[in-house]
Image (cartoon, rainbow, N blue to C red):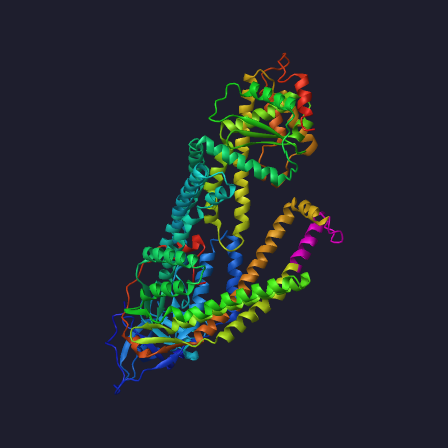
């Protein structure tokens, strides 16, 4: 006895909707020859619904079925008779089956490729290019103001107290000026190149928009020779020439949030985005730093200075502080110190020949003492 | 199509047809919901968010299928791929739009900013306003998709186009609201609800929003009253009390304001639904505001121990894992803890474990909030819903399928999707 024979006499009351209007009709549902038979109360057969294509939607309390003759139909039968529901469930194994929308899946894959391509194109090609162009269009005076504003914020962030956060002894300033002139002799900028020394123990230096460079006292203290400081200064001048600080700000503003579009959803996406954005920014920054290094080699060579001291500085920093390892290397904003040392060494044009020291011994002493 | 159907059979004719009044019902399994939400969240994490369209569809089917009107449940016919497709198209458009706008506005901000660093900062952030209009546009489209994919008795709901107009109206109304320090918010609420409702359809029958925005005004102003009263109390008592008491006072203020705001939301829901008509049928909602607030409060109380437990669990697990990889954390010397945490963070195992735990707990909380805050409140709202003159709904004729392209995916990309 098939399942169908077993249910041959089963009947249940139900409501029928014809899918044209919302008018309810009372019907009786029973089983026919591989069909569901729908009759009205005068025993007139309204329809046969083939069991093979019959599908059902279960209500969330599991007490009601909405039956459809086939997937795309507008007709409905609403059934709450538990016996009948169980019978239909037994007889129709495909009752709850949902079709896989193959065409939709294909389209989704194509557009997914498009979306990823669009995001990558914007983040890695279009925005950086446009940022590079727009940086040169900013009025020089505005760029200077922006740089000064950033400088103020950095100084207060670092907590440099006192009336004068910068070192201003006249002899020291003159020495710095000599170094600047030696390196930047042939550079053309729409604003003057300004170099300041910040009274702070960090071994660091950075370039700000508008031609402003800030060296840290810690850097001068840590350096063995003035040629090492010259190397760092040349590197920062390289940033200024390429407008790196301004381009970086524009690029970061332009790409902010784009990555978030792809990954941004409520569930922990924020972490993935933050890490990915940090990694992308870091990678971009590493390329920029490398280019600044190469400009530094060129400036040093043009000024008749060796790059070996520059390399030595990196080597020493590498030994003392170590490079970022493992995962954190991806987040490092600068290339590995050991690599920088190697490249700087290879770029040397002077070798063991004599060269004119970048500043006199007296000037060097003045520089070392300018923060007292 | 069917082909076997004979013309509809009508029942015996009565004299004057009585105007039937029915109350809606809501019945849904909490365990099913929890499982769908929990598993769905975990799968969404694993697929970097792609699965969320399937989870959202499942959750909507669950909620829609729990609402019964005159014995027949609502049907959600949306497909996950529809939302996914809309989302992907939105990403492409937004990537280009946002990128260029952000870049352009930042450039303009730098070029024309004054020396004042604050003004500079503001102009650099002005690009945020580029997205606000899009939020409203996306919201309307999302609502349209939800309606277009809802059926009752086989008849489709729908919504007329109008996203662009909606966007303009919403912007103007928000401008008004901000200028009046928020006092005109009930007006905004009513007007936007009316805009959407008047364009909504059940089959061939059109919804209409009736009523007056002033009905929402008093509950809204109450929030301001509570705020001002609390500020006065805080100020007066702030000097006289020890710091612990002032903290408790601030906490109490926050709770009171939240309750006042929630109360407004519930009253707005009840009020707006009571004013809706559909053809010759009408709606009324008898939501018990106190009951709704108590249910919400009960949910908060249920979540607190869960949050505490989760925090302790997470910390304990992290300590254990850190210990396993040899980067021990000594909880006795708390000064050392930050340094040791940084040290532990260098181990990939610890990072992955921490991330995994965080995601697990987030999934758990999402599933819990679905039960306590979404389903239980929805149940109250649905069970309080009354449909007057239900028979008039039978006059509705079937509505054509609305492609409603981008399926709310635009709103999803911007983070303002509704119906979840």
x, y (%) of residue A124? 46, 38
Above or below, B185 against A254 in this view is below
Above or below, B409 against B17 in this view is above
Q: Residue furthest left?
A: B7
Can I make out residue A33 in this image?
no
Residue B330 lies in the magenta-colored region: yes
Q: Which of A53/A306 is in front? A: A306
Asked whether, in this view, residue A38 is left or right of residue A268, the answer is left
x, y (%) of residue B206? 29, 69
Residue A34 lies in the magenta-colored region: no
Q: Which of B64/A39 is in front? A: B64
Asked whether, in this view, residue A192 is left or right of residue B74, the answer is right
Among the 4 quarters of the image, the one containing residue A334: top right
Q: Residue furthest right?
A: B332
Q: Which of B309/B282 is in front? A: B282
Q: Which of A370/A59 is in front? A: A370
Which residue occupies 50% across, 31% down?
A210
Residue segment shown in magenta = B312-335
Can I make out residue B89 in this image?
yes
Image quadrant in which the C terminus of chain A is located: top right
Asked whether, in this view, residue B324 is left or right of residue B140, the answer is right
Among the 4 quarters of the image, the one containing residue B13: bottom left
Above or below, A5 against B85 in this view is below
Q: Residue furthest bottom?
A: B15
x, y (%) of residue B90? 39, 50
Image quadrant in which the N terminus of chain A is located: bottom left
Q: Residue furthest top?
A: A354
Asked whether, in this view, residue B229 is left or right of residue B82, the answer is right
Which residue occupies 47% across, 60% down?
B55
């Amino acid at each position: 006895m098939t399942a169908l024979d077993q249910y041959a006499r089963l009947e249940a009351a139900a409501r029928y909707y014809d899918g044209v209007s919302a008018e309810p009709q009372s019907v009786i549902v029973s089983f026919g020859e591989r069909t569901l038979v729908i009759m009205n109360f005068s025993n007139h057969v309204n329809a046969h619904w083939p069991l093979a294509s019959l599908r059902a939607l279960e209500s969330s309390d599991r007490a009601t079925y909405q039956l459809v003759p086939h997937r795309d139909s507008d007709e409905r039968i609403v059934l709450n008779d538990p016996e009948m529901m169980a019978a239909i469930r037994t007889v129709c194994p495909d009752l709850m089956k949902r079709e896989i929308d193959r065409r939709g899946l294909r389209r989704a894959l194509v557009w997914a490729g498009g979306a990823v391509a669009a995001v990558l194109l914007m983040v890695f090609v279009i925005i950086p290019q446009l940022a590079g162009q727009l940086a040169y269009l900013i009025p020089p005076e505005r760029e200077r103001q922006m740089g000064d504003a950033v400088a103020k914020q950095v100084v207060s962030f670092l907590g440099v107290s006192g009336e004068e956060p910068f070192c201003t002894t006249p002899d020291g300033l003159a020495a710095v000026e000599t170094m600047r002139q030696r390196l930047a002799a042939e550079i053309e900028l729409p604003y003057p190149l300004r170099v300041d020394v910040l009274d702070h123990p960090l071994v660091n230096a950075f370039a700000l928009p508008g031609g402003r460079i800030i060296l840290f006292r810690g850097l001068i203290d840590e350096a063995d020779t003035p040629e090492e400081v010259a190397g760092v200064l040349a590197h920062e001048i390289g940033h200024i020439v390429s407008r790196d600080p301004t381009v970086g700000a524009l690029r970061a503003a332009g790409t902010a949030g784009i990555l978030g579009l792809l990954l941004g959803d409520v569930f922990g996406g924020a972490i993935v985005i933050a890490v990915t954005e940090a990694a992308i920014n870091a990678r971009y920054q590493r390329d920029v730093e490398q280019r600044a290094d190469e400009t530094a080699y060129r400036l040093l060579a043009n000024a008749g200075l060796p790059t070996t001291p520059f390399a030595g500085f990196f080597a020493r920093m590498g030994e003392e502080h170590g490079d970022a390892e493992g995962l954190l290397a991806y987040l490092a904003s600068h290339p590995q110190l050991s690599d920088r040392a190697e490249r700087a060494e290879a770029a040397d044009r002077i070798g063991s020949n004599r060269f004119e020291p970048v500043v006199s011994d007296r000037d060097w002493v003045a520089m070392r003492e300018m923060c007292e | 199509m069917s082909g076997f159907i004979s013309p509809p059979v009508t029942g015996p004719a009565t004299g004057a047809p009585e105007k039937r009044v029915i109350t809606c019902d809501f019945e849904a399994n909490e365990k099913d919901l929890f499982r769908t939400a929990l598993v769905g969240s975990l799968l969404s994490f694993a697929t970097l968010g792609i699965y969320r369209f399937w989870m959202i569809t499942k959750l909507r089917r669950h909620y829609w299928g729990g609402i019964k009107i005159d014995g027949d449940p609502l049907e959600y016919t949306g497909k996950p791929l529809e939302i996914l497709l809309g989302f992907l198209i939105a990403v492409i458009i937004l990537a280009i739009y946002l990128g260029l706008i952000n870049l352009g506005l930042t450039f303009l901000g730098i070029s024309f900013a004054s020396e004042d660093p604050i003004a500079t900062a503001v102009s650099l952030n002005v690009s945020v306003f580029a997205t606000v209009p899009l939020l409203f546009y996306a919201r309307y489209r999302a609502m349209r998709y939800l309606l277009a994919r809802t059926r009752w008795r086989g008849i489709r709901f729908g919504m007329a186009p109008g996203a662009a107009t909606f966007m303009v109206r919403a912007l103007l109304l928000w401008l008004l609201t901000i200028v009046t320090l928020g006092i005109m918010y009930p007006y905004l609420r009513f007007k936007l609800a009316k805009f959407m409702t008047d364009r909504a359809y059940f089959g061939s029958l059109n919804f209409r929003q009736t009523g007056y925005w002033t009905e929402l005004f008093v509950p809204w102003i109450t929030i301001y009253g509570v705020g001002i009263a609390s500020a006065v109390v805080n100020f007066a008592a702030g000097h006289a009390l020890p710091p612990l008491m002032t903290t408790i006072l601030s906490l109490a203020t926050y709770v009171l304001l939240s309750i006042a705001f929630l109360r407004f939301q519930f009253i707005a829901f009840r009020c707006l639904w009571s004013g809706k008509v559909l053809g010759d049928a009408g709606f009324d909602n008898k939501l018990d505001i106190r009951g709704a607030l108590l249910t919400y409060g009960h949910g908060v109380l249920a979540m607190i121990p869960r949050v505490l437990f989760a925090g302790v669990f997470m910390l304990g697990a992290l300590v254990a894992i850190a210990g396993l990889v040899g980067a021990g954390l000594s909880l006795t010397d708390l000064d050392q803890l930050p340094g040791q945490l940084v040290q532990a963070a260098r181990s990939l195992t610890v990072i992955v474990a921490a991330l995994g735990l965080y995601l697990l707990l987030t999934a758990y909380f999402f599933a819990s909030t679905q039960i306590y805050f979404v389903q239980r409140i929805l149940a109250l709202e649905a069970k309080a819903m009354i449909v007057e003159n239900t028979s008039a709904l039978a006059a509705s004729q079937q509505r054509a399928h609305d492609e409603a392209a981008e399926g709310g995916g635009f709103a999803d990309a911007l983070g303002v999707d509704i119906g979840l």
